[in-house]
């Protein structure tokens, strides 16, 4: 039987939507894996606006999820972005750069249709050493 005392913590972050089979994020050791986020305000209402407005709301949704476990956007090391229309890339990229101005991260951006009506969806991976946190 493995020694669980040395096992990396693995737990859910955020309130799971009862209609969906996943959590907003999961911590596994020193990494936080943020599920795909879309533009929602702090109350969970969808933001339906320009690509700039939806990009801001999406990044701020990621920021809120990370904050639930003590991490910030500065801890993000990887982002995957799904744009409904790649013609929005320049406008999206400008807003992304505002939030990740001095970031050291890897990013992929692809064109894809989301399963809900949104112009942008992003998932992220953050490196944030656990510092004694427990799930």
Image: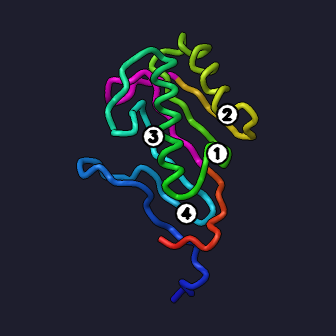
Asked if residue 9 lies in the magenta stretch, the reply is: no
The image position of residue 123, as x and y in percent, is 51, 40
Residue in the image at 62% along x and 21% along y: 93
Residue at x 46% of width, y 52% of height:
25
* Spatial separation of the CA atoms under disc 3 and disc 2: 18 Å
- Residue indicated by mark 4: 28
- Measured in 3D between alpha carbons, the distance from the residue under mark 4 to the one under mark 3, in whole angstroms, is 17 Å
Q: Is 24 on the left or on the right of 87, as rendered?
A: left
Residue on which disc 2 sits: 100
Q: Position of residue 21 (x, y in %)?
A: 31, 52
User: Which residue is the site of mark 1?
Assistant: 76
Which is more toward the observer, 94 or 8?
A: 94
Residue 113 lies in the magenta stretch: yes
Label 4 crowd (10 A; few <14 / some 14-19 / many >=20): some
Quarter holding residue 7:
bottom right
Q: Are marks 3 and 2 in contact (CB under 8 Å)?
A: no
Among numbered discs 3 and 1, the one appearing first in the sequence = 3
At 48% from the left edge and 48% from the top edge, which residue is drawn? 65
| Label ID, residue 36 | 3
C-alpha span from label 4 to label 2: 23 Å
The magenta span reads 111-125
């Amino acid at each position: 039987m493995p020694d669980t005392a040395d096992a990396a913590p693995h737990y859910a972050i955020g309130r799971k939507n009862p209609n969906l089979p996943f959590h907003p994020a999961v911590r596994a050791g020193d990494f936080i894996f943020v599920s795909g986020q879309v533009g929602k305000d702090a109350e969970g209402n969808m933001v339906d606006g320009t690509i700039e407005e939806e990009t801001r709301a999406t990044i701020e949704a990621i920021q809120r999820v990370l904050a639930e476990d003590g991490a910030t956007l500065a801890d993000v090391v990887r982002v995957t972005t799904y744009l409904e229309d790649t013609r929005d890339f320049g406008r999206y990229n400008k807003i992304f750069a505002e939030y990740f101005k001095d970031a050291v991260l890897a990013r992929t951006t692809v064109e894809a249709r989301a399963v809900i009506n949104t112009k942008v969806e992003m998932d992220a991976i953050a490196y944030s050493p656990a510092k004694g946190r427990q799930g």
